[in-house]
Image (cartoon, coloured by chain):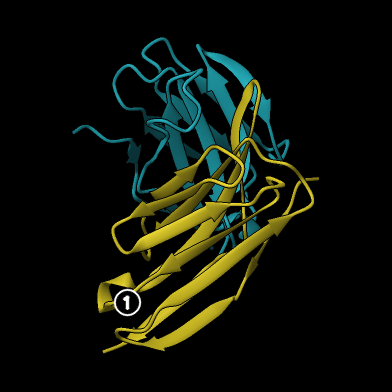
């Protein structure tokens, strides 16, 4: 079945540093998404990517959808303590199904 | 703005008992999705409903069933609970045909089976 491989699994960085994480898949996705999840809460959408090669920013976050529609990266610039959490990539196949396939997640810890 | 409401937030059940989780979608959202997230795991799709009909099915055990009602709220029924069913259960809602636009997750129900 479809699977997203997300890396790194965890990161421990100093406040102010930039962060990069990525996801790859053997499947082509219609839409690629990046979510942040705080402990005990539901995933919150950060960025949605719809077109191959698309580069989108949301404040300090930048994400790109790969040309082949099989990969994506998320960059966070100038990290702050509230960036702490688990970041998930997710793919939506499109068509009649709206279900999401999630990556394994990247746990980010920021040291003040 | 109204969000996806899930109840209860926390639930503790014993093995072999039954649990019912409820999800109230954002007003005018016609599609509901259920996900299961085990400890340290990513969310896994269970099942979805559009206009009260099952629209897609994932890795949902036969012991689980779900339905969507006329007011679009959905319930996930879990029987013969096992220790491995302990997880966060998320519901998401959206408007059919709009892709990811407005696709919103609830805060989840944490089910603990003892």
Query: For the view shown, which residue lies furthest in the left direction?
Result: B1
Q: Nearer the viewer, residue A46 or B79?
A: A46
Q: Nearer the viewer, residue B63 or B9?
A: B9
| Residue B23 coordinates in the image, percent (x, y) | 39, 32
Please tell me whether residue A87 is drawn above or below residue A48 in the rendered image. below
Element on which disc 1 rests:
loop
| Residue A12 coordinates in the image, percent (x, y) | 45, 87
> Quarter of the image holding residue B22?
top left
Q: Residue at x 62, y 19 (%)?
A: B54
Residue A104 visible in the shown view: no
Colour yellow, chain: A
Disc 1 target residue: A79
| Residue B79 coordinates in the image, percent (x, y) | 61, 39
Colour cyan, chain: B
Q: Nearer the viewer, residue B43 or A102?
A: A102
Locate the C terminus of chain B and report the quarter of the image it occupies: bottom right
| Residue B46 coordinates in the image, percent (x, y) | 62, 39
The answer to whether residue B26 is left or right of residue B82 is left
Q: Residues within 10 Å of mark 1 (few under 14, many from 20)?
A: many
Locate the N terminus of chain B and report the quarter of the image it occupies: top left
The answer to whether residue B103 is left or right of residue B45 is left
Q: Residue at x 40, y 78 (%)?
A: A18
Residue B26 visible in the shown view: yes
What chain does badge 1 belong to? A
Q: Residue at x 61, y 42 (%)?
A: A52
Q: How many marks?
A: 1
């Amino acid at each position: 079945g479809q699977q997203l491989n997300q890396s790194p699994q965890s990161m421990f960085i100093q406040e102010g540093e930039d962060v990069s994480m990525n996801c790859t898949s053997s499947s082509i996705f219609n839409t690629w998404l990046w979510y942040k999840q705080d402990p005990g809460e539901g995933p919150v959408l950060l960025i949605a990517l719809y077109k191959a090669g698309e580069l989108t920013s949301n404040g300090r976050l930048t994400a790109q959808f790969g040309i082949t529609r099989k990969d994506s990266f998320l960059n966070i610039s100038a990290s702050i303590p509230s960036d702490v959490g688990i970041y998930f990539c997710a793919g939506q196949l499109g068509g009649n199904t709206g279900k999401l396939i999630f990556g394994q997640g990247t746990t980010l810890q920021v040291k003040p | 703005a109204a969000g996806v409401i899930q109840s209860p937030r926390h639930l503790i059940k014993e093995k072999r008992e039954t649990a019912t989780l409820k999800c109230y979608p954002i007003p005018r959202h016609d599609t509901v999705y259920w996900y299961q997230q085990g400890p340290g795991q990513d969310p896994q799709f269970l099942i979805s409903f559009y206009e009260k009909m099952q629209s897609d099915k994932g890795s949902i055990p036969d012991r689980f069933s779900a339905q969507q009602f006329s007011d679009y709220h959905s319930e996930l029924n879990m029987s013969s609970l096992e220790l491995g069913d302990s997880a966060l259960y998320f519901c998401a809602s959206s408007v059919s045909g709009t892709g990811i636009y407005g696709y919103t997750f609830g805060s989840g129900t944490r089910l603990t089976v003892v």
